[in-house]
Image (cartoon, coloured by chain):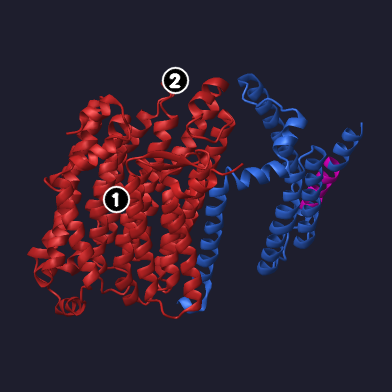
Chain colours: A red, B blue
Amino acid sequence: MYDFLLPDMGATAPILLVALIGVVLVVVDSFSNDSASIPWLSGAVLVAAITIELARVGVTDSAFMGHVMSGGFASFVNVVILLGALGSVILSVPYLSRTGHNFGEVHALILIATAGMMVLANAGSLITLFVGLETMSICLYVLTGLVRDNERANESALKYFLLGAFSTGFFLYGIALLYGATGTMMLSDMPAALVETGRTGFFAGGVALLLIGFFFKVSAVPFHMWTPDVYQGAPTTLAGFMSTASKTAAFAALILVLGRILPLDDVGLDTRHVLAIVAAITMVVGNVLALAQRNIKRMLAYSSIAHAGYILTGLAAGALGYAGALYYLLAYTVMNIGAFGVMSVLEWDGKQGAEQTIDSLAGIGSRKPLLGVAMGVFMFALSGFPPLAGFFGKYFVFAAAVDAGLTWLALIGVLASVVSAYYYLRVLVAFWMKKPEDAHVSVQSAAFDVPLFSKVVLVACVAALIALGIVPGFITEAAGAFFVTPEATALLP
Amino acid sequence: MLETFLFFLFAIVAVVGALGMLIARNPVSSALWMIMTLFSIACLYITLNAEFIGVIQVLVYAGAIMVLFLFVIMLLNLESMPSLGDLDWRKVVAFALGIAVLAQLLVVISLKLDVMPEPVAIAEAADATSATNIGIALLTEHSFSLEIIGVLLLAATVGAVMLAKKRFV
């Protein structure tokens, strides 16, 4: 009677595989003291999952009675999430070994968090949406507080946990109201059910609460307060993981929700104004506050807030902007993993880089040219210089906003990204053009070797940014095919 | 007739338990009074044919959560509770009246706006919430979510141990 469950497991194989290996790692770690095989195992399963998903980008499917999406959009997003996880795992091994926190459990939690993100990004119903969100969040709370002897890490983990639990409450109330208004948990059934019941008041309340939950997870202003503290206190490579993979998952879920239940003009609800206003505030506040930061991790946190604003601009444009937002998420993942990766090998304050100022990195570029050049590429990409991938990401979302009649929003975005060039380039000035004043610092900085695998990841990120920037077409075509409206495809080059 | 009798019986026990919880000056007796309330609410569920929710109410609230409460009471060692004589009874009356007016207003507003859901026949509701149907749904339609929740609970346990245990300093 329930024969469909077996093929459904095949359709969701990457999620199940990653979760399964996550559980297996917990067991392996408890039986063996040899933790060297654990990162290899988790790297291998991530590569396997990426391979499966790449093969499934062409098909569109759903599993478990529509509760989980599979193939197409879901596969594309999963690839981005898995790439972020893979980069973080590889960069984390030397970083965590150096700080003495390379436990098997960390890798298990990274894998389980990745599985949760994929569930969130592939959700077909409000239940899977919530389960995925919680799986992701709880693992991230723990990973934030990993370094227990660092007070700032404890503070940031507690802050993240309390605020996150609070936002989960909003999210859950939103789900309850949406269910009360429509009587269904399936995202695809919602618009029809809403027209039938006519409970738009309930529904609007649910949408508002749900959006608050999403805004918190993607750290949009005014729900961004936790981001700088958490990124500053968390272990650097894991902060990179949080800022890329979890944001990708949350944005993908937001696209699913917006695309499936919010084209509700026929019942008089239009969320695009809300998204546009939040996007504008987020871009302005994120970029302006980033100007004042002296700590690079904090600066990158504000920059990640600003980037959430750019992506929200794409979402505010409606279906026109979804493909651009997906391209942006891929580019953003690559450049942020790289930037946090560079910082992870340039930390010598013993506090996970929480107290290190930008000036302490003076002259690093000439001392470690590979890191200097790589950081240069990441900073130019983040600020949106052509021909790197960051430029085309911004171009796609802003062009979509203009086409959707939100010219003022695109204008704010362009001005905000002009401002952002100042703080990104300031890092490069410190890296290449300043002389180290403190001999002590330069001695310490020379003591760190850059591990081979970290070099490989950083070079791969640089190469990917250049490749994505030179030939953006194949990604946007793939992404555009998921939203097959004529307007959406006409926009793409 | 029996239904009405049972409803009022359990409802009165629930309200008495709630009042007892507020009036008791010993935190442990307060917790025990609260168990009485939770139990009679579970009985109310069962008289509505919602056996599953009733059993879960006993297991989760009267069982697990109350044990947690008792642990917290033990750990915090709450001793000095303000005595009842110190209460300003005028404030209590004002509070009760305020709540009553608010409730009336909410009822009037919700009737006017027609936001209250339609009541469902007991037989229909009982069918949807029977343990059999919930079990079938959990293991077929929601089997994926069930598995992921299992992984989530494991991750939470592992994380709690990681953050609390000595080896991980």
Q: Amino acid at mark 2?
A: Gly
Residue at point 25% right, 32% down? Answer: A409
Q: Nearer the viewer, residue B62 or A328?
A: A328
Q: Which mark is residue A268?
A: 2
Quarter of the N terminus of chain A within the rendering: top right
> Do discs 1 and 2 belong to a common subunit?
yes
Q: Give the answer, above or below, for where B132 lies relative to A293.
A: above
Task: Find residue A179 and report its horizontal and vertical position in percent.
Answer: 57, 34
Magenta stretch secondary structure, dominant: helix
Q: Nearer the viewer, residue B3 or A116?
A: A116
Q: Which residues are magenta?
A: B11-22
Queried whether the magenta region covers residue A310, the answer comes back as no
Task: Find residue A412 and report its horizontal and vertical position in percent.
Answer: 22, 35
Badge 1 element: helix
Q: Which residue is mark 1?
A: A304
Badge 2 element: loop
**Left/right of residue A9 with respect to residue A478 in the rendered view:** right
